[in-house]
Image (cartoon, helix red, strand yellow):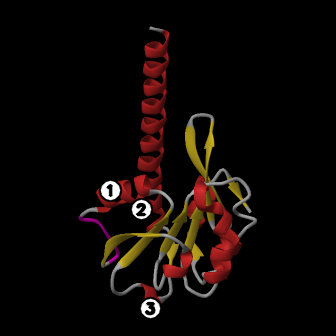
Amino acid sequence: MKRLIILLSLGILTYQISSAQTGIAKAQAMFIYNFSRLIEWPENYKTGTFVIGVIGSPELAAELTSYTTGKKVGLQDIVIKQYKDHFEIDRCQILFISFAKSKSLSDAAAFLQNKSTLLISEKTGSIEAGSAINFSIVGDKLKFEISPANANKYGIKMSSKLNEMAVKVY
């Protein structure tokens, strides 16, 4: 009986964690889509498809696919791609690197330096490692911090509206 109670408790805990991760991924997907409308890319990145890449979070990739279906950035159709690492990337307007894959963030930042890619992360200290936007949980809400200087290194410009919405601007 004790074993059954423990197994049920673990099952409930796993479900709660899974539900929380899905909720966070859903909120991140909405933020990322809205970021796409508040960033200025070079002209050559405003043609073809608008690629949002994800490393290390199949949940976020699924939520992005669901949320962006039928939507565009300007005149560009949105495509969501999952990558194993940053070396697979050719052309990508936005790249999200999950907490689990954050060890590669500094290398990804160096790799993307001249590729006009908005680098987004979700680990404390990621702005210092080169991320332009970093998600964080404040209380029970998803928030973000930004670095316009890091965005400029990637050849993209952030709208001043992001400064107003961010919990911290570097």
- Amino acid of disc 3: Asn
Kind of element beneath mark 3? helix
Toward the viewer: 146 or 58? 58
Residue 99 in view (yes/no) = yes
Residue 131 in view (yes/no) = no
Residue 62 lies in quadrant? bottom left
Tell me what residue is drawn at x 41 percent, y 52 percent.
59
Residue 128 position in % (x across, y down): 76, 65
As measured in the structure, the alpha-carbon distance from the residue carrying label 2 to the one carrying label 1 is: 8 Å
- Amino acid of disc 1: Tyr
Asked if residue 76 lies left or right of residue 12, the reply is left
Q: Are marks 3 and 2 in contact (CB under 8 Å)?
A: no
- Of the residues under marks 2 and 1, which one precedes in the sequence? 2
Q: Which residues are magenta?
A: 70-74
Asked if residue 128 lies left or right of residue 151, the reply is right
Residue wearing tag 1: 67
Residue 29 lies in quadrant? bottom left
Q: Are marks 2 and 1 in contact (CB under 8 Å)?
A: yes
- Of the residues under marks 3 and 1, which one precedes in the sequence? 3
Residue 75 lies in quadrant? bottom left
Residue wearing tag 3: 44
Residue 78 position in % (x across, y down): 33, 72
Residue 112 position in % (x across, y down): 60, 81
Magenta region, main secondary structure: loop
Q: Quadrant of the C terminus?
A: bottom right
